[in-house]
Image (spheres, helix red, strand yellow):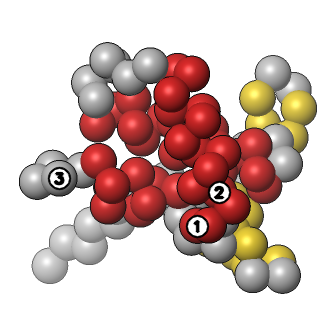
Amino acid sequence: MKLILIVLKVRFVSYAGGMWEPHPPIVRHGITLTPRAAWVHLFRQEWVRLAEGLADDESVLEVAAELYEKEGERDPVEVALELFGPGR
C-alpha cells in the first residue's frame, strides 16, 4: 500500500482576546499586517473571488470594515462565503 501525503497551505484561526488572527501572519510588501488589516485583506480577496473579479473595491472595504466590528472573531473567508457564497 502506498502512503500519499497531501500538503495544503492552510491559514487557521488563533484567538487573542477573542479576535481572529491569521497564522502564519500575512506579510504584504515587507510589512506584517495587523489582525484587522489581515481580516479585511482576506475578506476582500474572497469577495473578489466570489464576484469573479467584478467587486467594487470601495464597497468591499466599507462592508469589510463594518463586518470586522461584528464578526472580527471569525474567519473572514467563512464570513464572506456565508454572505456572498453560492446560493446566496
Q: Which residue is mark 2?
A: 68
From the viewer's side, name the closer residue of 86 and 1: 86
Q: Are marks 2 and 1 in contact (CB under 8 Å)?
A: yes
The image's mark for residue 71 is 1
Dot 1 amino acid type: Glu
Residues at marks 3 and 2, CA–CA distance in whole angstroms: 20 Å
- Residue at horizontal 19 percent and vertical 72 percent from the top: 2
Q: Residue 58 location in percent, x, y?
A: 57, 22
Q: Are marks 1 and 3 in contact (CB under 8 Å)?
A: no
31 sits left or right of 85 in the view: right
Residue 30 in view: yes
State the image quarter where residue 35 is shown: bottom right
Q: Quick check: 21 above or below 47?
A: below
Q: Which residue is mark 3?
A: 88
Numbered disc 1: secondary structure: helix
- Residue at horizontal 81 percent and vertical 21 percent from the top: 29
From the viewer's side, name the closer residue of 32 and 51: 51
Dot 2 amino acid type: Tyr
Q: Quick check: 81 above or below 49?
A: below
28 sits left or right of 73 in the view: right
From the viewer's side, name the closer residue of 46 and 1: 46
Toward the left, the furthest residue is 87
Numbered disc 3: secondary structure: loop
